[in-house]
Amino acid sequence: MYKIHSFKKSKFIKYKITTEAKNILASSSIESITEIDGNIYIGISNHILKYDYRTNIISVIVSDIGSPINVLCPTNDGKILVGTDSKGLFVMSKDGQTSPYL
């Protein structure tokens, strides 16, 4: 069992991590982190992980976007802009659906 600090509750909270997310974290470095509605989104290599504060689980939400992720930027409408090395800019919904930004 792992723990993450909650600044709102001023304590450490136990969380679980899926095997796939654990393997990605072990083999790559974090490039970008953002937060929307209490959930934390982590850009790491070609993947996006999500820490869901309601379930206290870290899981893979996008398994391979096709290029290393440089930045995650929340939008006013609750989506995330995903900037990559060589595939350009994507828009991601909270559930992990991505589409090229036009």
Image (cartoon, rainbow, N blue to C red):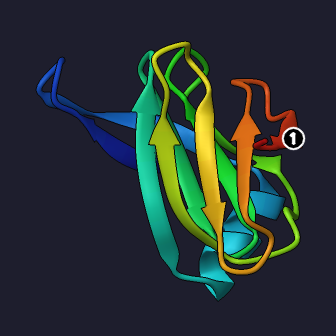
User: Image quarter for residue 34?
Assistant: top left
Residue annotated with mark 1: 99
**Left or right placement of residue 89 versus residue 41 in this view:** right
Give the x, y percent position of residue 20. 82, 62
Please state if 85 lies on the left or on the right of 72 as rendered: right
Mark 1, residues whose alpha carbon is within 10 Å: few (<14), some, or many (≥20)? some
Q: Is residue 27 above or below residue 82?
A: below
Q: Residue furthest left?
A: 10
Q: Looking at the rendering, in which quadrant would you find the C terminus? A: top right
At horizontal 80% and vertical 60% (from top left) the residue drawn is 19
Q: Quadrant of residue 56?
A: top right
Is there any visible trace of residue 1 in the rendered image?
Answer: no
Residue furthest to the bottom = 27
Q: Position of residue 41 (x, y in %)?
A: 54, 43
Disc 1 marks a residue whose amino acid type is Ser
Question: Residue 78: horizontal and vertical position, in percent?
Answer: 55, 17
Which residue is depicted at the point 41% across and 21% down?
38
- Identify the residue at image location x=16%, y=29%: 7
Name the one closer to the observer, 50 or 36.
Answer: 36
- Residue 22 appears at what percent x and percent y? 69, 65
Relative to the observer, which residue lies in front, 81 or 35?
81
Tell whether 62 sits left or right of 50. Answer: right
